[in-house]
Image: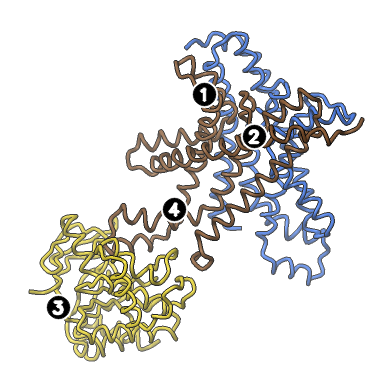
Amino acid sequence: MPLLTMNNVHKRFGALTVLNGINMSVEAGQVAAVIGPSGSGKSTLLRVINGLEPIEKGTIEVDGVSTASLQGLREVRKQVGMVFQQFNLFSHLTVGGNVMLAQRLVLRRDKSEAEKRARELLARVGLEEKWGSYPSQLSGGQQQRVAIARALAMDPRIMLFDEATSALDPELVGEVLGVMRSLAESGMTMLVVTHEMNFAREVADRVLFMDKGSVLADGTPEDILVRPTDPRIQQFMRRLTEH
Amino acid sequence: MFLDWGSITTFYGQLLKGAGLTLVITGLAFAIAIAVGLLVCAGRISRVAPVRWASTVYVEVMRNTPVLLQIFIIFYGLPSLGLRFSAVTAGVLGLGLNVGAYLAEIFRAGVIAVPKGHREAATALALSKVQTLIWVVIPVSLRAVFPALSNMFLATLLGSSLLSVIAVPELTGETNEISSRTFLTIEVYSFSTLIYLALTLSCSIGLALLARWLFPRASRS
Amino acid sequence: MDFTPVWNARWLLLDSFLTTLLLSTIAVVVGTLVGAIVAVLRTLNVGILNVVLRAYVELFRGTPLLMQLFFVYFGLPMLGVNVDKFWAAFSAISLYTGAYVAEVFRAGVEAVPRGQVEASTALGLTFVQRLTYVIAPQALRVALPPLVGVYVSVIKDTSLATVIGYNELMRRAMELVLQYGRPLEIFLVVGILYFIICFPISKFSEWLERRLARNGA
């Protein structure tokens, strides 16, 4: 059974249809990259999974739990980690505080257990020495790595990355992609909205191309990125390489 | 004409007692104001329209009429409806209800000041609405509104002098009493002015230290 | 509730209402002038002058208006300066307002980017030219919403003049209460009178603030 299933998911913002009947699933351990032009609904695709945006029609299930009920949604949120384009670290908490907050409040871990897990994860993203720093004292790349550690601290089954490197200065992109790459290698299930085609080609098992609220193509990186057959994908890839 | 600075030493005790009462009144009125402010702020952003309207009317009425009048209504007016308060209670209540209207607006601005991303991150981490409010929204907005809160505290301190008008023996009241009894008017008013300056200065220093302790420099994004 | 005493005294109340408006207007005008002068003098950055101006602002913002009224009305005669009720009320409220206005203007001046002041100096503008063409137009835009907010406070604060017996609206209300009783009715009506003048000005201040937030400084 797939870890994530979306059935006929529809989402509108007013008159604008953002998701137009999405059907897709992600198997455990899979890394799926979502690409496509801006406004194609990539971010919304992620945001409906943990209910940041409500859907009008269709069903979403994570590990067999539907997001339709409030209780189910809360359960799904525990299983789904999310990393945002703008990091969204809590500015009033230290790095350690950021990684511990939800462990304490949601998973009800005691302080020493939460701290131990937080320190492990910060070491994993290479920031154990930033424990007592505040987000404003970190570079964008460091903030995003803390945000990844914060999401991982919930021991999620699946991680969503919403353009995690788009807000970063070019020289800081590599450190975040490095962490994401090692996470993928560790077997984490990942759904990654990205503009980094090299990352998609090298790390993803699967690439989904979205356009106008639909998944236009779904295949191996080779099929979608190297030898695309659909003219719209060909055009998209051409525009990317022109820059 | 000569000034007799020596004689006011006799009244130090009385004036300091008045200053003490001023501080107590300020503290009580501000505590009421915080409670009222939170309640009215919740009302202002409520989804229930009549609650929203009532809160808005409260804020506008309290902010657009003199606080002295509000104190008079409570002290002189409400007894005709059978509600009788002592002068101190009426004054503290009037001051607290008035300042509460200002605090409601400050709190509202604070809630708006919390970045949307903070809420989304909390939601994505499966925090409940109440947990998000307590652990994210309130701490972040408190930091944003702390300077405005400090100003309102000082305004409450100065506003407490109005209670002298309904014969509460706080600092201004005691000053008037001594002045009219001894005619050491200049001396005693000068001395009380210094006490007020000392009170406002030490309160603003205290609040600044509190801010520094509550909000480490780097946590101010 | 019985509003007949209020109704019978309507012309007296109206008269006092006009007195309150008059006192407010004069205090607003003089207070604004005082505040503007203080703010401009502070931009000169002359050591001793700055200390004096700062002391003025801190003194009037750090003590209750009520004390200031008492000081002027009861204290000055002791120093041989005789002031009548109007002059006491007017001068205390104006000086008090001036201190707040000075701070509002100072915040406005500080909102003008330093680079612009330096640029205009580099272009050879004199102090007065810098003030007139560069600082004042921008500072005023920023200062206007809180300035109008201060004016609302002035109107409400004139009610304190009642303590020295100046016959404005609040004083009249208290006299009527003493004469006829009915405190709730009389104070409610007086509250409405204050509200109908303060509310539109508050809204105007908020509108100015929104406009400023929209268009930027």
Distance of label 2 from label 3 (alpha carbons): 73 Å
Q: Secondary structure at mark 2?
A: helix
Query: Which mark, by number, is residue A28?
Result: 3
Q: Position of residue C146 (x, y in %)?
A: 62, 46
Q: Are marks 2 and 3 on the same chain?
A: no
Q: Please tell me whether mark 4 sits on a helix, a strand or a loop.
A: helix
Q: Chain of mark 2?
A: B
Residue under label 2: B17
Contact (Cβ within 8 Å) of mark 2 with mark 3: no
Chain A is which colour?
Answer: yellow
Task: Measure the alpha-carbon separation of dots 4 and 2.
Answer: 42 Å
- For the N terminus of chain B, which image quadrant? top right
Q: What x and y, as percent, mark residue A169?
A: 45, 81
Residue for point 76% across, 67% down: C120
Q: Nearer the viewer, residue C100 or B174?
A: B174
Label 2: how many Cα within 10 Å (few below 14, some 14–19, many 20+): some
Mark 4 — residue? B112
The reply to whether residue B132 is visible in this rendering is: yes
Q: Which chain is blue?
A: C
Q: Identify the element where label 1 is drawn.
A: helix
In the image, which is nearer the foreground, mark 3 or mark 1?
1
Which residue is nearer to you in this view: B211 or A67? B211
Q: Earlier in the sequence, mark 2 or mark 1?
A: 2
Which chain identifier belongs to the brown chain?
B
> Residue B74 bears which disc, if any?
1
| Amino acid residing under circle 2 | Lys
Look at 60% across and 28% down and name the residue there: B68
Residue at left 33%, top 68%? A100
